Amino acid sequence: MDNAEAVRRRAVTLWAAAGTPAEAAAKLLENSHAWLGASTSSIAEFHGHTLKLKAPTWTQSQLQEAIQAVVTQRMRFTQAATHYGIPKGTLYDNILGKSKRMAVLDEAGLLSSEERAVLDFCCETSVSPYNRRTKKSLAEVLAYVEKLRRSRDPSFAFIGLTGFRWWWAFCKKHSIVSLYYEGAAKVKISKVKTEHQTDDES
């Protein structure tokens, strides 16, 4: 019996068992190539491969240092990501959370009038209504917000990363561009000291 006749007879048998020519053809193809019916794990074992997740190139210690650098305004997200070799998305997730990042605004519980007061404190909108740039530090802003909130709730306080998360969300909501970061402040202070020393020497 030649190969063509054997295949024909096998097909007839499968059609009778499967019910339709299409199902029989699929079954025939699967039986002809056993690997098509194999699981992905068995195929991997057959080829000697195992699926492995790529290990991060940074340590948990570096991640914590990067987080501290961002939340203390010593570095911006991009700077910290580059400096510590950590994906910016990883920093965002660890600092701001993976979802509902704007919900912290509701949790802070500021009234509309209080939000306007904070906006004026940061950007002097009473003088320049459309200004959305601020040089206020995070510490200054949070102290001001806590003072506002404590007039209604004496126990109010930002805890842990909550303050930074609130400020990030507030800036996003009002399109505020923060020009402040600790590195720039230190450079400015150093420059002022140098100028004073020069004046004293002259």
Image: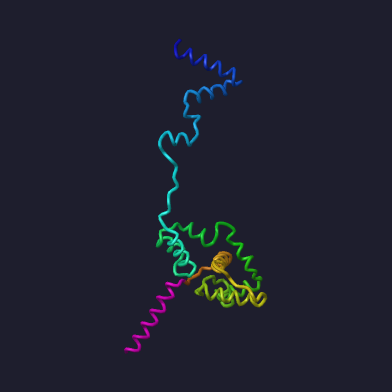
* Residue positioned 40% across, 75% down in the render: 187
In the rendered image, residue 122, in percent from the top left (x then y), is placed at 55, 74
- In the rendered image, the quadrant that contains the C terminus is bottom left
Of residues 120 and 40, which is closer to you in this image? 40
Query: Quick check: is 193 in the magenta stretch?
Result: yes
In the rendered image, residue 120, in percent from the top left (x then y), is placed at 58, 75
Of residues 21 and 68, which is closer to you in this image? 68
Determine the image quadrant of residue 103: bottom right
Determine the image quadrant of residue 110: bottom right
Q: How many marks?
A: 0
* Residue positioned 40% across, 55% down in the render: 57
- In the rendered image, the quadrant that contains the N terminus is top left
In the rendered image, residue 89, in percent from the top left (x then y), is placed at 48, 57
In the rendered image, residue 83, in percent from the top left (x then y), is placed at 40, 62
Q: In the displayed structure, does residue 143 sit left or right of residue 55?
A: right
Q: Main secondary structure of the magenta part?
A: helix
Q: Residue furthest left?
A: 202
Query: Quick check: is 60 in the magenta stretch?
Result: no
Determine the image quadrant of residue 119: bottom right
Q: Residue furthest top?
A: 1
In the rendered image, the vertical position of residue 83 relative to residue 180, given as above or below: above
Q: In the displayed structure, does residue 78 sit left or right of residue 124?
A: left
* Residue positioned 60% across, 72% down in the render: 157
In the rendered image, the vertical position of residue 126 relative to residue 63, given as above or below: below
Q: Specify the segment rendered in magenta.
A: 181-202
* Residue positioned 43% across, 33% down in the render: 46
Color style of the picture: rainbow
